[in-house]
Amino acid sequence: MAYIFECYHCGIGLKAQADQAGDVMKCPDCGGSVNVPHAFIEPGTVIGGFRIQKLIGSGGMADVFVAEQLAMGREVALKVIDPLLARDSETAENFIREMQMTARLEHPNIVTVYDAGESEGYLFLAMSKVQGEDVDQLLRREGALPERKAIRIGLSVANALDYAWSTGEILHRDIKPANIMVDDEGNVKLMDLGIAESVADDHLPKPVEKGETERFVEGTPFYMSPEQALGRSLNFASDVYALGGTMFHVLTGQLPYPGEDPQAIMLSQINAPIPSARELNPRISLECDRMIAKMMAKKPDQRHGSWSELIAEMERLAEHPPAPAMQEGEAAPIKITAVKAKKTKAKEVPKRRPASTPRTSVPNVAAQNGMSFNAAVIWAIGIVLLILIFYAIFASVKSP
């Protein structure tokens, strides 16, 4: 694909092909040396029969766009490798191998691949477009997820990885929250097998020999296994470790080994003690905490012996999550016991005073003396009248 860019010495328009990105060319007008920039992919650009609509994500070696597959009239997620990286034969071979492996995986928890190839100096991979968000976005929005929800996400990923391993001993090699999608219906999809490799194809690096100090390592340091950080041979247990680190992050909202220096983080993966997720989030059950610790064991043979073993444990926790055990100083959980009310016969229930009648502690003297209320009133009036008569007589006698 040809594109035009400006010479930054004289401003004249220069023409280049996508596979020339990164080259140095001489401007025919001013004679200055110019670095050929990367081709600018914009809405409307067509790559391999896919018309670009918009950019939705960028990674270490590729960009992901929403695109329309012209032949089928459907929207897809189109992954386009950086043209500069595509010129490197090893990188191109890795990307092509990804296409070949991903295309043969058909599983409800793995993103479906539609097409792959090369066009105008670009390598591309067309996948189904998942309507939803990745788990990394979910964590940023909600924070640490509840145990049952986290385990169900991990269980879906484990089923996908079990399928990939049993199909062709295929490893993902870069499991992390950003590579796990949850669609609008709650279905979990594993995506971005960008550095996945098949052990059966014998492409994995040899163990680091004594005296070696540097080796190119693929993956994300925050979640990679010790053996992957060391550049050693991998098997399914390496993906188990990365899934354990991912679940640690999902359950606590924090990374197992945080930091900014990739080398320091990888050294922590190799040498640092296994962190406890429960120490960061006491709501996590002991059983779940122990499962994650086993997944993140430093030695592969100390982790779960198979995906089936791990899946069975996750299924038990997902269906019957235990209550978190008490830590020292924690209050005992409140137990609510249902008690059936005893039935009482109507004649045994005392009559209640009407709500509008106030209660009083003053005794009814007239009632206690056996008189009715009306009689008592008459007697009181009579006594008052007698007192008034005697007072009037006494006053008339004293007056002159």
Image: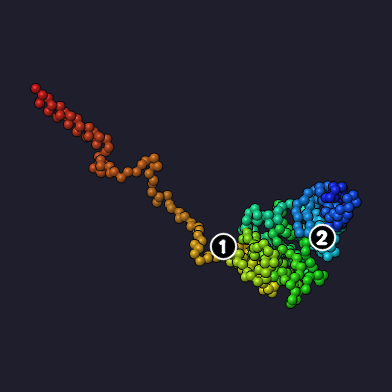
As shown in the figure, which amino acid type bears the numbered disc 1?
Pro
Against 299, is 362 above or below?
A: above
In screen coordinates, is 176 left or right of 37? left
As shown in the figure, which amino acid type bears the numbered disc 2?
Leu
Residue at the spot 37% in from the left edge and 41% down from the top edge: 357
Disc ID at residue 60: none
Residue at the spot 70% in from the left edge and 61% down from the top edge: 176
Q: Which residue is mark 2?
A: 85
Where in the figure is residue 295, as x and y percent of width and height?
66, 68
For mark 2, give the secondary structure.
Answer: helix
Q: Nearer the viewer, residue 90 or 376?
A: 90
Q: Which residue is mark 1?
A: 282
For mark 1, give the secondary structure.
Answer: loop
In screen coordinates, is 27 left or right of 108? right
Residue 360 visible from this viewpoint: yes
Specify the quadrant of the image occupied by residue 64. Answer: bottom right
Of the numbered discs 1 and 2, the one sitting upstream in the chain is 2
Where in the figure is residue 211, as x and y percent of width and height?
74, 76
